[in-house]
Image (cartoon, rainbow, N blue to C red):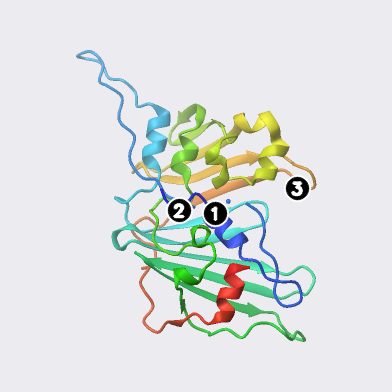
Amino acid sequence: MRRRNTLISAIRRTTVTAAVFATLAGGLVGCGQGTGESAAPGPAGTSTAPNPKETLLAAVPDETRPGFSYTIRDWETTLTGEVAPAVKSIHLRTSFKDPELGFTMHMAYLTVDKEAWARINFTETEGLTGLPKLPNKWMRLDPTKLTDDDSLPTEYDGADVASLKPVLANTTIVQSASGNYRGTVDLSGPAAADILSEETIAGIGDGAKTLPFQATVDVDGRLTTFVVKVPAVGKTKAYDYSVTYGDYGKAPAVAAPTDAVPAPALAYELLNG
């Protein structure tokens, strides 16, 4: 895996200065594919039940999956989009409402193999001046003009958009019943960067080693939901970090835009913070 930040991290680090934009700050998609190995067969005439942890790991989206949609949520950010592993492409969308000025910034990213585009627009801007004038089209990104391209999605980086493979590898207890899984996950180590900010991890302390989670898998062995219960830290109330997958084989197609324009300098000022 090349990038450790999740999509939420990538969007949040895109800062917008006070008088003109807004700030998306904080900490959370990455990659990592593969399937879990099945348990070794028992003696003749018997069968060994699949290991729940291995089954859950194997359910995480990988390059063999058909296209699907996803939603990733934490206490303040929601990302939605589609993934098409067959053509190495990811589409993601999010919106941020400025609590003081009242406008909403809508951001979208699209990656197809080693190319990337962004789209940014503003709504609810009545009475406001000074907002940036950006093309109302997909803007083709030049990674060399991004000051920290490892934290923004500049190329396809695998079907595991929520970086759940390394997270689920740290589960310590997994119980299952009819496609429903629950247990605890250790988010005190490196994999936690894909779920929690450093401040949150420090605030939780030792409790980060045994955070409760729930997950569901469909009848075809594909992950559909993953939820971690995050306790209150400082002024942040307890919340659910959740990932939802769906529309396997039915999600809208993800393709390179045909009318994209080169991203202007102002777009890079936004993306570089």
Whole-percent x, y for residue 33 in the image: 36, 45
Q: Pointer 3: what residue?
A: 236
Q: Is residue 90 above or below residue 241?
A: below
The amino acid on which the numbered mark 3 sits, given as a three-letter code, is Thr
Q: Residue at x 45, y 68 (%)?
A: 143
Which of 118 and 225 lies nearest the eye of the viewer? 118
3D distance between C-alphas at marks 1 and 2 = 9 Å
Crowdedness near tag 1: few (<14), some (14–19) or many (≥20) residues, C-alpha within 10 Å:
many
Q: Pointer 2: what residue?
A: 161
Helix, strand or loop status at disc 3: loop
Which of 213 and 128 lies nearest the eye of the viewer? 128
Helix, strand or loop status at disc 2: loop
Q: Residue at x 61, y 86 (%)?
A: 133
3D distance between C-alphas at marks 1 and 3 = 18 Å
The amino acid on which the numbered mark 1 sits, given as a three-letter code, is Ile
The amino acid on which the numbered mark 2 sits, given as a three-letter code, is Val
Residue at the left extreme, as displayed: 44
Q: Are marks 1 and 2 in contact (CB under 8 Å)?
A: yes
Helix, strand or loop status at disc 1: strand
Which of 151 and 131 lies nearest the eye of the viewer? 151
